[in-house]
Image (cartoon, grey):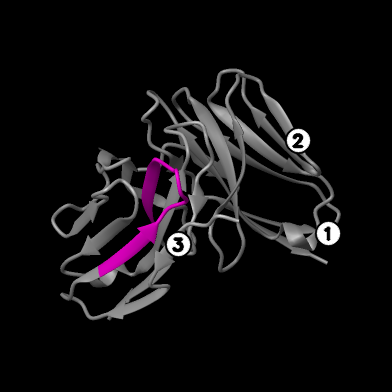
Amino acid sequence: GQQVMQIPQYQHVQEGEDFTTYCNSSTTLSNIQWYKQRPGGHPVFLIQLVKSGEVKKQKRLTFQFGEAKKNSSLHITATQTTDVGTYFCAAARGSTLGRLYFGRGTQLTVWP
Amino acid sequence: EAEVAQSPRYKITEKSQAVAFWCDPISGHATLYWYRQILGQGPELLVQFQDESVVDDSQLPKDRFSAERLKGVDSTLKIQPAELGDSAMYLCASSFLVQGDGAFFGQGTRLTVV
């Protein structure tokens, strides 16, 4: 089953508003990855976080990994219509051969 | 730009028939994943290979599903017999390192069982 819980499941925002999705696990994670899937497309890798408390930025996107390595967030500043899609976190835990489990995703809709 | 190749893109099959999907990962990627994705849900891991070895197939319904990667390069996922509930997108992904690199996904095979 799912190893990571992702909330919210859906988010509708007006263009220019901010957006945040959260990913939570009951166990410590080795790393966490974030993916974006456009409608009708396949998941596309965005970033990986490995270190406790790590923060990474990609233009308007900010990714954080919790201090306990059990949660993560993706924040988009000033959303644009091109941000539409479903954002997934995916986590591996345990050994270097750990499985890559995906959350259910947050579906983002941006109204112009 | 290197891509993960999957075929076919679409497959319609009758229940109880056999169906097979093919995946050619990015050259040099040792790790290969097969995922199943139902509309509105996240990808569900079916099987993970490291080179030609199965690392994890705990989520693979082994009574009807099988997967192989004989030479550690391309891979085949088979379903026999197909059931109505198998209708989904089947995604293949590959990554360079065992753990620590992002997975690159193919376009997927959309399976419809009628």
- Seen from the viewer's position, the closer of residues A96 and A104 is A96
Q: CA distance from mark 3 to mark 2?
A: 30 Å
Depicted A55 relative to depicted B76: above or below: above
**A8 in magenta:** no
| Label 2 neighbour load within 10 Å: few <14, some 14-19, many 20+ | few
In the picture of the structure, the residue carrying the numbered disc 3 is: B5
Q: CA distance from mark 1 to mark 2?
A: 20 Å
Stretch of the chain drawn in magenta? B20-36
Q: Quadrant of the N terminus of chain B?
A: bottom right
Say whether residue A20 is left or right of residue A48.
right
Of residues B52 and A80, the one nearer the viewer is B52
Q: Secondary structure at mark 3?
A: strand
Amino acid type indicated by mark 3: Ala
Magenta region, mostly helix, strand or loop?
strand
Amino acid bearing label 2 = Lys
Q: Are tags 3 and 1 found on a single chain? A: no
User: Of A110 and A44, which appears nearest the observer?
Assistant: A44
Residue on which the image places disc 2: A57
Quadrant of image for the C terminus of chain B: bottom left
Residue type at tag 1: Glu
C-alpha separation, residue under disc 3 versus residue under disc 1: 35 Å
Residue B110 percent coordinates (x, y): 40, 71
Residue that carries the numbered disc 1 in the rendered image: A15
Image point (44%, 25%), residue name: A27
Q: From the viewer's side, name the closer residue of B18 and A61.
A: B18
Q: Evaluate whether label 1 is on the same chain as label 2.
A: yes
- Give me the residue at 38% from left, 31% from top: A98
- Asked whether the viewer can see residue A28, the reply is yes
Q: How many marks?
A: 3
